[in-house]
Image (spheres, helix red, strand yellow):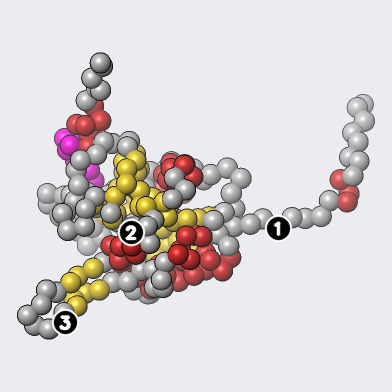
Amino acid sequence: MPEFINEGLDSLQPVKNKIGLILGLPMGREAVRREWAHAMMTIGWPLGMTIMHSVVTNKAISEARNLICQQALEVGAKYIWFVDDDTVPPSSSIRMLMYQLDQHLDAIAVGGIYCGKTNPTTPMVFKDFGQGSTWDWKVGETFECDAIGTGCFLIRTELLKQLPYPWFRTIDVVSEDAEHTQLQCTDDFYFCKLAKVAGLKILAHGGVLCHHWDMMTGEVYKLPEDSLPYVNSKVKTAQP
């Protein structure tokens, strides 16, 4: 029989793990799609990372996101990953998002891309504020943008300290007086504008394509396979 020597192991003390990732779930509905539940069950989590769940229910979306971010700062979590209850991410999404954020240290966040609940649909990613959705990208490509939907959104928690609170805010209508321009701003646009003012980058990940469900009609919205991002990804780069 071999002899096993465990010299010194008795003196080791338990080491408390740091929180690597908070999975932030702002749950605004009483039920979710089975596709969403299955997707979350099959997520491929990063190796060696402690995961903490933060679930906020019965709150406005912006308030829920702010509460989750506050908790992440309190526990010292490295990342926050928001997944909305109508947004279905691919199983490899968190690893793909984290890889890109780890390579771009001047970026505060990176988001997966999903489409709006309209026909025809458009991707919820914007390269220039006020210019509408952008189609000028390739499937699989990671690129800088001005704003992106935060339904599948990874944040580097530490950089939240460079932004004023609240980090998320929904502005329905703001008007100085009846003759001036009115402003409407969703919570995701608000966050992205704060980041841009602070000189921090927002990235979009064209390889993390999510399905976006209309919970009222049961219709799912996704990037059309004949759209420009797919076409661009199939065009071979010309050789010199």
| Residue in the picture at 63% in, 57% down | 18
| Residue in the picture at 17% in, 38% down | 227
Q: Which mark is residue 154?
A: none
Residue beneath disc 1 = 16
Sort mark 3 into few (<14), some (14-19) or many (20+) by Cα contacts within 10 Å.
Answer: few
Residue beneath disc 3 = 176
Amino acid marked by disc 2: Lys
Amino acid marked by disc 3: Glu
Q: Nearer the viewer, residue 39 or 122?
A: 122
SS category of the residue bearing label 2: helix
Percent coordinates x, y for residue 172 in the rendering: 21, 74
The magenta span reads: 221-228
Q: Nearer the viewer, residue 196 or 165?
A: 196
Percent coordinates x, y for residue 153 in the rendering: 38, 54
Which of the image's four quarters has the N terminus? top right
Question: Mark 1 and mark 3: span between their CA atoms?
Answer: 52 Å
Question: Are the residues flagged by discs 2 and 1 in contact, CB closer than 8 Å?
Answer: no
Question: Mark 2 and mark 3: span between their CA atoms?
Answer: 24 Å
Question: Mark 2 and mark 1: span between their CA atoms?
Answer: 36 Å
User: From what the image shows, is residue 223 above or below residue 130?
Assistant: above
| Residue in the picture at 28% in, 72% down | 170
Sort mark 1 into few (<14), some (14-19) or many (20+) by Cα contacts within 10 Å.
Answer: few
Label whose residue precedes the other's in the sequence (2 or 3): 3
